[in-house]
Image: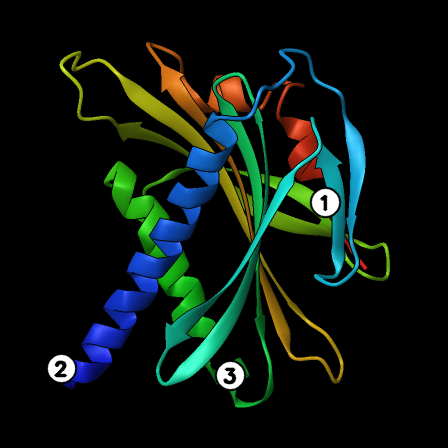
Amino acid sequence: MPTNKRMRQGLFRAKFAQALCLIALALGVVACSPSLNWRTVQAPEEGYSTLFPAKPDKLERNLPFQDQEIHQVLQAAKIDDDIYSVSSIHLVGKQVEFLPKILKQLQLNVLSRAGVNLQNALTQETFYRNANQQRMVAKNYFLEIPVSEKNNSAHQLMRVMWVASTVENDGVWIYQLTVLRTRASNEDAKTILTNETFSPFFEEFKLD
């Protein structure tokens, strides 16, 4: 692979990670209610709706990828130590050809943090609804992410789901739904992140 192409892909990874860090930092200084207040959040421009446990903040940015600008929108809400987020990436025109590479890169960015891959990560199938209100199967991944602190037992828990949707005459959308528990001790990721505190966020995801 040419050096400049590797550099652009590396920049895409860095920019995506930076976007997640920025919204996490922003949410960290927002006072949040400790109780869950589920509400349907409509995102018509991004073509989806889902339940959030609080009003989400929104961040938009363009990410460089192979001489193109890829538009990304992040919506996220923080409740105590838990961050709920939906990332939407819109591919239009010839950018649609990038779908397999970008999806693979997004998955690698997340799974590598936990030292796993698509084949050996802990998973569970769940459902979302497409634009025709049909139930569609999606695989959810449950991750334990080490945190570099003095306390070696410290780690983060994550549940993540990816959905790719083709829209007639409007390209392709890539959605990444994530719940991140930023502070965890001996909790099991799948046990914790499938309870009623988190499941509605994934199970009520609907495409417009």
**Label 2: which residue?**
3
Residue 98, above or below 20: below
Secondary structure found at label 2: helix
Report the amino acid beneath label 3: Gln
Q: Residues within 10 Å of mark 3 (few under 14, many from 20)?
A: some
**Label 3: which residue?**
95
Q: Quadrant of the N terminus?
A: bottom left
Chain-order first, disc 1 or disc 2: 2
Residue at point 33% right, 10% down?
185
Residue 102, above or below 67: above
From the image, state whether disc 1 or disc 2 is nearer to you.
Answer: 2
How far apart are labels 3 and 1 at the CA level? 25 Å
Q: Position of residue 33 (x, y in %)?
A: 65, 14
Side of 166 where 153 appears, left or right: left
Residue at point 81% right, 37% down?
40
- Work out whether residue 110 or residue 182 is closer to the camera in this orientation and state it: 182
Side of 179 where 108 appears, left or right: left
**Label 1: which residue?**
205
How far apart are labels 2 and 3 at the CA level? 21 Å
Report the amino acid beneath label 1: Phe
Side of 138 where 27 appears, left or right: left
Chain-order first, disc 3 or disc 1: 3
Side of 154 where 179 appears, left or right: right
